């Protein structure tokens, strides 16, 4: 398989190299966590003052280390005096009692520690509990459009973008010659996450209900989602459920990095709103592999792509509310704010006016951007930057 150097994430790892935190790489299944770790090891291992201890607990040759005491002894024995020692462990959750081992090694201050593992056991919300808050999390996402262009170099950015929309960012699927086989691969990842990461960890009794809720969220990306309404719709069909169960199942889907919840933000009152979040898929390939392309709303699909890209670039992301109007995203990073509206085709005058009206109603001086499928270079309208989505996505992360 062709390997792409993921500089954005490698630079993140380099920035915390030798910092006394446990570094944990998280992200949806098959997003490249182990490959990123291997690439980072290659970067730092050329020095003869460096000692690398690499353990892949999913491989048979490390099977004996699934016992916590043996894992601890193995790590201790490979420590080298007068060298900088680095510990890298894949699939750490396979060792029962792993947190006791890692916390002990950490307290001894003898290794710089890096971990990956199944999302069921290394969920963001669990990390502080497992390791006492001494964690630096690197959130890894599927391939961005910029990375896709490195994998599939092309002269026509618009043609490449259309292919990326269909193909998605799950790089393992790029090996398959047909779209049907690629989507089978992606769907296998989605269903494995459901059965192994969610059903098993949270002891889900109704897997069919969980899948149905996931499908509902896929079909409604970009829409405000009321847990009560989801429960009501499912109950009116063939499923018996309630608000509490639906809320819990949605939470599990988010904790496994399949979906990302985006909270609403009152622009006028400058406060966060708890009601009716929006949910965006970590990669749209999951949608197309699970429920197909029929009735796909490309305005909402592009909105999903922008939401994930903003998260990928390190922004805090919110849905903006201003009186009765809504702005797709309020993105905040390092105290700076940008308002973003996303659309498909804005060639019709009425569509264009509708999309810019929300941005024009915001009276502060922060930047305002309309991202749409224009297939043109950037332009401006009354201070609003109008950028084609393919060109906006093609810019590398910073």
Image (spheres, helix red, strand yellow):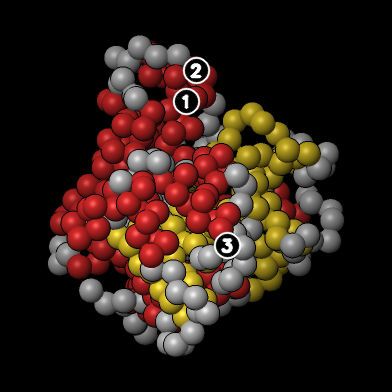
Q: Residue at x 60, y 44 (%)?
A: 132
Q: Is residue 59 left or right of residue 134?
A: left
Residue for badge 3: 109
Please give the residue where the numbered disc 2 appears in the rendered image: 244
Find the distance from the CA under tag 3 to the CA under tag 1.
38 Å
Residue 240 at what x, y percent from top left? Answer: 35, 12
SS at badge 3? loop
| Residue 107 on image: x %, y % | 58, 54
Q: Nearer the viewer, mark 2 or mark 3?
A: 3
From the top left corner, tell me how far across and down residue 266 is, in percent. 75, 40
Other-residue count near label 1 (Cα within 10 Å), few / some / many at <14 / 14–19 / ≥20 = some
Q: Along the line of sight, which residue is nearer the eye, 212 or 333?
A: 333
Q: Which numbered marker is on residue 248?
A: 1
* Label number found at residue 317: none
Which secondary structure, mark 1?
helix
Q: Quadrant of the C terminus?
A: bottom right
Q: Considering only order in the chain, which callout, 1 or 3, is on the residue closer to the N terminus?
A: 3
Q: Are marks 2 and 1 in contact (CB under 8 Å)?
A: yes
Give the residue at x 52% y 42%.
Answer: 130
Would residue 318 appear left or right of 6 to someone viewing this image? right
């Amino acid at each position: 398989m062709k390997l792409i150097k993921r500089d954005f994430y490698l630079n993140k790892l380099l920035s915390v190299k030798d910092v006394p935190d446990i570094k944990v790489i998280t992200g949806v299944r098959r997003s490249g966590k182990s490959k990123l770790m291997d690439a980072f090891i290659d970067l730092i291992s050329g020095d003869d003052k460096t000692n690398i201890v690499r353990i892949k607990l999913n491989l048979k040759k490390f099977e004996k280390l699934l016992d916590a005491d043996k894992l601890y002894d193995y790590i201790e024995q490979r420590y080298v005096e007068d060298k900088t020692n680095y510990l890298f462990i894949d699939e750490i959750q396979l060792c029962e009692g792993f947190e006791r081992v890692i916390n002990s090694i950490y307290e001894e201050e003898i290794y710089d520690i890096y971990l990956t593992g199944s999302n069921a056991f290394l969920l963001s919300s669990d990390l502080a509990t497992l390791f006492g808050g001494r964690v630096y999390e690197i959130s890894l996402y599927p391939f961005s459009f910029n990375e896709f262009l490195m994998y599939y170099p092309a002269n026509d950015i618009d043609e490449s973008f259309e292919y990326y929309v269909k193909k998605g960012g799950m790089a393992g699927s790029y090996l398959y010659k047909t779209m049907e086989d690629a989507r089978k691969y992606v769907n296998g990842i989605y269903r494995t996450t459901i059965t192994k990461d969610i059903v098993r960890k949270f002891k889900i009794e109704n897997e069919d209900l969980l899948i149905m809720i996931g499908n509902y969220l896929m079909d409604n990306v970009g829409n405000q989602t009321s847990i009560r309404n989801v429960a009501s719709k499912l109950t009116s069909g063939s499923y018996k459920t309630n608000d509490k169960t639906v809320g819990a199942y949605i939470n599990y889907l988010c904790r496994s990095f399949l979906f990302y919840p985006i909270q609403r933000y009152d622009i006028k009152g400058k406060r966060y709103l708890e009601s009716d979040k929006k949910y965006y898929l970590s990669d749209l390939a999951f949608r197309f592999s699970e429920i197909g392309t029929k009735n796909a709303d490309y305005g909402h699909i592009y909105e999903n792509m922008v939401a994930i890209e903003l998260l990928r670039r390190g922004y805090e992301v919110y849905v903006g509310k201003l009186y009765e109007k809504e702005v797709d995203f309020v993105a905040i990073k390092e105290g700076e704010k940008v308002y973003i509206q996303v659309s498909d085709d804005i060639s019709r005058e009425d569509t264009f006016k509708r999309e810019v009206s929300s941005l024009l109603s915001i009276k502060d001086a922060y930047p305002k951007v309309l991202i749409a499928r224009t297939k043109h270079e950037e332009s401006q309208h009354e201070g609003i930057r109008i950028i084609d989505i393919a060109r906006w996505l093609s810019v590398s992360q910073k």
